[in-house]
Amino acid sequence: MDLIDLGNTTADEARRGAFLDQLCQQLELDFASYATQHPVTGAVQGYANYPEEWKRYYAAQGLQRIDPTLWRSVRSIAPVDWERFSDDAGFAAVFDNSREFGIPAQGLTVPVRGPMGDCGLLSVTRACNREEWRKLKRRIVGNLQTAAVHFHDSVMRSETVTLLMKMPAISVREREILQWVAAGKSQQDVGDILSISHRTVEVHLRSVREKLGALTTPQAVGRAVRLGLISPT
Amino acid sequence: MDLIDLGNTTADEARRGAFLDQLCQQLELDFASYATQHPVTGAVQGYANYPEEWKRYYAAQGLQRIDPTLWRSVRSIAPVDWERFSDDAGFAAVFDNSREFGIPAQGLTVPVRGPMGDCGLLSVTRACNREEWRKLKRRIVGNLQTAAVHFHDSVMRSETVTLLMKMPAISVREREILQWVAAGKSQQDVGDILSISHRTVEVHLRSVREKLGALTTPQAVGRAVRLGLISPT
DNA sequence: GGCCGGCTACGGGATTCCCCCAATAGACTT
DNA sequence: AAGTCTATTGGGGGAATCCCGTAGCCGGCC
């Protein structure tokens, strides 16, 4: 899982950084960050207004691999208070040292998903006592939800990312063949069904594997099902 | 002996209907509805506090097949104002007659998704002039987002419970191996990873294929992904 | 104790898949 | 009009999968 800091080149970066800053200012927060994972390649990309030292440390240590605010939130529907990670070893590993960088271990992550299996995580932090935090959280969770949706929508629409995350252009034939394979047919079967050579079937499968970034046909089927391209019978 | 309290589901339904009523009351709305397509069975289930006549008419005409507030919203990340459907033929077909039932054609649909590809749609309507509607919308969109998340979460939790009871009894080892196969590993790879013979891997795969009623490994992976047993990487 | 299911391991042989190669027709761009 | 891209169609050969067995060990259940 690679960590790509989008943002040193495009003009979008400044706008999105400003958005995070504005979010913090308006909702009385310390820091805000956004991360998304490519549904095909699995690469993680993000924006954050954390101090540069913390970003560098985080990336250098590869903390995204153990950070529960990422891998646990990505499995959640609802916003997740980091309080839930208090007895998580990974959380301790990430946030025990974060105080030295001025990063509080009190925060909230809002997951937001698109129709293609894409998932974005908007996280915010605030150093204050727990009672204040709960009141603040209750007050701003709706705004955060809206902000997360807007941010994720913006990132998904952005050219930079659409280049990186463009939905694989699966041809009709490829989808058709993958559908039959997912239905339990062999390549020879599919060839007979479609009245084409099983060699041709294999070429299409090879093509669709490549487009989905899959090493094997089972992996391609799994991803295609996940992306809603096909539905298993 | 299975402990399945069927009365629980009806209690859930009553509770969810009450939730929609409460939502309308608190946010100054006329009607609210929720719909989701079960990612496994594909069955559509919904809750709404529309008048019974409208529900019956809607179901009798099969309007869910052309209703853009459903099939277009499931492709959206952000909440969708029905204003966007004003020049949609399907929208006109659905909502031209809705006025006779007291259903305004002014509304908003909030999509919400879970990590398994599940998607829920929370829709609300309000009859008022456009300026009022815009102000109301801006004020409540955060609450609607939060409400949609909670509603969807509740439905998915109860669904997964009932789903687990129908789920084939896949052993831990089988699930583990199928997960690696879905990650693009060959049988030999999996054997090396788990420090077992590739022959053994094949035995487990054979077993899991049989349990899932799949003829081939790709089909088994597709079904397992759809059942949420594994998640493709 | 006997029985059953799960995990482990092995082999032979038939089938299937996967990767190298090439080629044509049509759509699209320049 | 020429080039480019994609979808489509093939072959051959090596690798992998799949199906047919066998068999020991362990833990739970009647």
Image (cartoon, coloured by chain):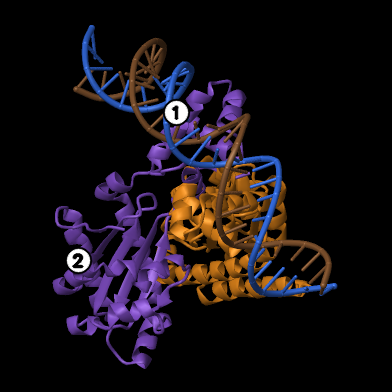
Chain colours: A purple, B orange, C brown, D blue
Q: Are marks 2 and 1 in contact (CB under 8 Å)?
A: no
The reply, left or right, for residue A233 in relation to residue B112 is right
Q: Which mark is residue A56?
A: none
Q: Which residue is drawn at 50% across and 59% down?
A: B109
Quadrant in the rendering for residue A44: bottom left
Position of residue A210 relative to residue D25, above or below, is above
The reply, left or right, for residue A102 in relation to residue B53 is left
Q: Nearer the viewer, residue A61 or B145?
A: A61
Is label 2 in a helix, a strand or a loop? helix
Q: Nearer the viewer, residue B11 or A176?
A: A176
Give the residue pinned by disc 1.
A203
Q: In which quarter of the image is the N terminus of chain A?
A: bottom left
Q: Residue A175: percent from the left, percent from the top?
A: 50, 35
- Residue A174 visible, this angle: yes
Q: Residue at x 19, y 66 (%)?
A: A18
- Amino acid type at image mark 2: Ala
Chain letter for mark 1, please: A
Q: Residue B139: percent from the left, percent from the top?
A: 40, 71
Give the residue pinned by disc 2.
A18
Position of residue B41 relative to residue B171, above or below, is above
The reply, left or right, for residue C14 in relation to residue A74 is right
Q: Which of A120 and B142 is in front in this view?
A: A120
- Amino acid type at image mark 1: Val
Q: Which of A14 and B98 is in front in this view?
A: A14
The reply, left or right, for residue A167 in relation to residue B10 is left
Quadrant in the rendering for residue A96: bottom left
Q: Which residue is drawn at 50% across and 28% down?
A: A201
Q: Which residue is drawn at 39% across and 76% down?
A: A141
Q: Residue A75: percent from the left, percent from the top?
A: 46, 66
Q: Residue B166: percent from the left, percent from the top?
A: 70, 61
Quadrant in the rendering for residue C16: top right
Position of residue B8 relative to residue B49, above or below, is below
